[in-house]
């Protein structure tokens, strides 16, 4: 397996990872933290895909992992100021630095357990660094080694972020799947 991670510039590859099998279905499309909550709730069916196309025209909305050309993973990464984390009451700001946020890591079924999430996080860090980010934050669960429900594992785990060099920056008031979420920070300066 040869994994490469690069900025997400191909709509079809993004759709493979975060879009529905049936175009009219309502799925996240990784928009829930990227756009205002009211807009996110109002969008349905194919309008969600069109919103992602619009974001893509503004620049890569994340990174994609490829295994010998086959898309196998996705990580959402973008400046926090353009996400709902900018105004979150449950996830605090550590300081006023213009950090980037990583909020979704997804690996295709059949490819999980092979280190792709680690490669995605490294690729997200690299993309943020190349884009001038002074730091990157993630908001994973602190599951202390316990199993996380697969549908909620998209935020990552504290240990995944620690292995990538992040440090615990702050606790949060957010809980996901019964586990507290924490702010993990990696300075890039």
Image (cartoon, rainbow, N blue to C red):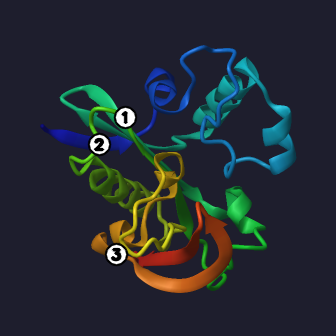
Do tag 1 and tag 2 residues touch (Cβ < 8 Å)? yes
Compared across the picture, whether 109 is left or right of 10 comes to left
Q: Which residue is mark 2?
A: 112
What residue is shown with label 3?
162
Q: Is residue 106 left or right of residue 49?
A: left
Numbered tag placed on residue 80 in the rendering? none
Q: In terms of depth relative to the viewer, which is nearer, 52 or 73?
A: 73
Badge 2 marks a residue whose secondary structure is loop
Mark 3: secondary structure: helix
Please, is residue 26 above or below residue 101 in the view? Answer: above
Residue drawn at 62 percent across, 84 percent down:
94
Total numbered labels placed on residues in the image: 3
For label 1, the crowd category at 10 Å Cα-Cα, with few meaning under 14, some 14 to 19 and many 20 or more, is some
Residue 30 against residue 100 in the figure, above or below: above
Q: Position of residue 138 (x, y in %)?
A: 51, 67
Residue 6, picture quadrant = top left
Q: Position of residue 176 (x, y in %)?
A: 61, 63
Residue sitting at 51 percent across and 57 percent down? Answer: 155
Between the residue at mark 1 and the residue at mark 3, the CA separation in whole angstroms equals: 23 Å
**Where is mark 1, residue-wise?**
108
Query: Which of the two discs, 1 and 3, labels the residue nearer the N terminus?
Result: 1
């Amino acid at each position: 397996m040869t994994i490469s991670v690069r900025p997400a510039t191909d709509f079809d590859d993004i759709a493979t990872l975060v879009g529905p099998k049936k175009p009219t279905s309502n799925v996240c499309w990784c928009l829930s933290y990227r756009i205002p909550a009211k807009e996110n709730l109002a969008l349905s069916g194919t309008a969600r895909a069109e919103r992602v196309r619009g974001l893509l025209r503004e620049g890569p909305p994340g990174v994609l992992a490829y295994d010998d050309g086959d898309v196998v993973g996705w990580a959402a990464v973008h400046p926090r100021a353009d996400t709902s984390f900018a105004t979150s009451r449950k996830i605090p700001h550590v300081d006023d630095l213009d950090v980037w946020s990583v909020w979704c890591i997804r690996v295709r079924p059949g490819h999980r357990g092979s280190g792709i999430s680690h490669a995605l996080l490294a690729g997200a860090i690299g993309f943020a660094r190349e884009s001038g980010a002074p730091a990157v934050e993630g908001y994973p669960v602190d599951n202390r080694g316990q199993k996380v429900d697969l549908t909620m594992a998209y935020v990552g785990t504290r240990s995944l972020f620690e292995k990538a060099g992040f440090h615990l920056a702050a606790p949060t008031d957010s809980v996901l799947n019964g586990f507290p979420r924490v702010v993990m920070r990696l300075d890039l300066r």
